[in-house]
Image (cartoon, rainbow, N blue to C red):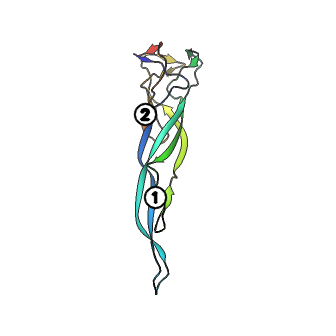
C-alpha cells in the first residue's frame, strides 16, 4: 500500500518533446549587386521540462495535519525550454519561437484509490498520476509515511 498524498506533496518532473518550435534564418552578406538579407534555413524544436511546486489539495479531511489530495485536485506547474533555444549569432538567428521559452499552468490529479474516497473523490497516494497542463503524465512522489491507501 502507498502513503496518502496530501497538500504540498511533491511531483516528479516531466518532459514534453518538441513543445517549443522555432525557425532558423541565416544572413547573406551584401555583394556589389545586392544588399545583405536573411533567408530561411530550416526549423527546429526543443522540449519543455515541466516542474511542480506541489499539489494543492482542497479536501476537508486531514492526514498528518495536511489536507488529503483527491482526484481532480490541482498541481501548480512551470515549464522551461530544455535544452534552451540556441542563441542567435551574427550570421544565424532563431525566430518565431512558439509558444515561447517558458510558461506555467495547472495539472490535475487523474488517478487515485479504487476503494478509499473523500467527498466522493478517490484519495490520491504516492505514485498516483497527474496529467500536466501540457498533456504529459507524471506521478506524485511524496506523501504520508504512516497513513496508507490501496
- x and y percent of residue 73 in the render? 53, 28
Instruction: Pick whichever, 135 or 119, lies toward us.
Output: 135
- x and y percent of residue 108 in the render? 50, 33
Q: Is residue 47 left or right of residue 120?
A: left
Instruction: Pick whichever, 6 or 51, lies toward us.
Output: 51
Tell me the residue that label 1 is attached to. Answer: 22
Name which quarter of the figure residue 138 lies in: top left
- x and y percent of residue 90 in the render? 49, 67
Q: Identify the residue at image location x=50%, y=28%.
A: 10
Q: Identify the residue at image location x=50%, y=43%.
A: 79
Instruction: Pick whichever, 8 or 112, lies toward us.
Output: 8
Depicted 35 relative to depicted 113: above or below: below
Which quadrant of the figure contains the N terminus?
top left
Q: Identify the residue at image location x=42%, y=44%.
A: 16
- x and y percent of residue 121 in the render? 51, 22
Tell me the residue that label 2 is attached to. Answer: 138
Give the SS element for disc 1: strand
Which quadrant of the figure contains the C terminus?
top left
Q: Identify the residue at image location x=47%, y=84%.
A: 34
* Numbered tag placed on residue 145 in the rendering: none
Amino acid at each position: 500500500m502507498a502513503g496518502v498524498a496530501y497538500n504540498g506533496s511533491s511531483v516528479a518532473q516531466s518532459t514534453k518533446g518538441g513543445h517549443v518550435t522555432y525557425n532558423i534564418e541565416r544572413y547573406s552578406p551584401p555583394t556589389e549587386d545586392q544588399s545583405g538579407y536573411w533567408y530561411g534555413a530550416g526549423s527546429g524544436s526543443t522540449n519543455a521540462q515541466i516542474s511542480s511546486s506541489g499539489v494543492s489539495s482542497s479536501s476537508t479531511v486531514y492526514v498528518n495535519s495536511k489536507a488529503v489530495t483527491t482526484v481532480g485536485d490541482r498541481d501548480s506547474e512551470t515549464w522551461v525550454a530544455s535544452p534552451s533555444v540556441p542563441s542567435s549569432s551574427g550570421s544565424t538567428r532563431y525566430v518565431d519561437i512558439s509558444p515561447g521559452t517558458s510558461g506555467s499552468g495547472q495539472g490535475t490529479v487523474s488517478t487515485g484509490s479504487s476503494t478509499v474516497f473523500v467527498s466522493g473523490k478517490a484519495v490520491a497516494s504516492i505514485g498516483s498520476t497527474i496529467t500536466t497542463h501540457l498533456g504529459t503524465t507524471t506521478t506524485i512522489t511524496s506523501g504520508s509515511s504512516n497513513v496508507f491507501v490501496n
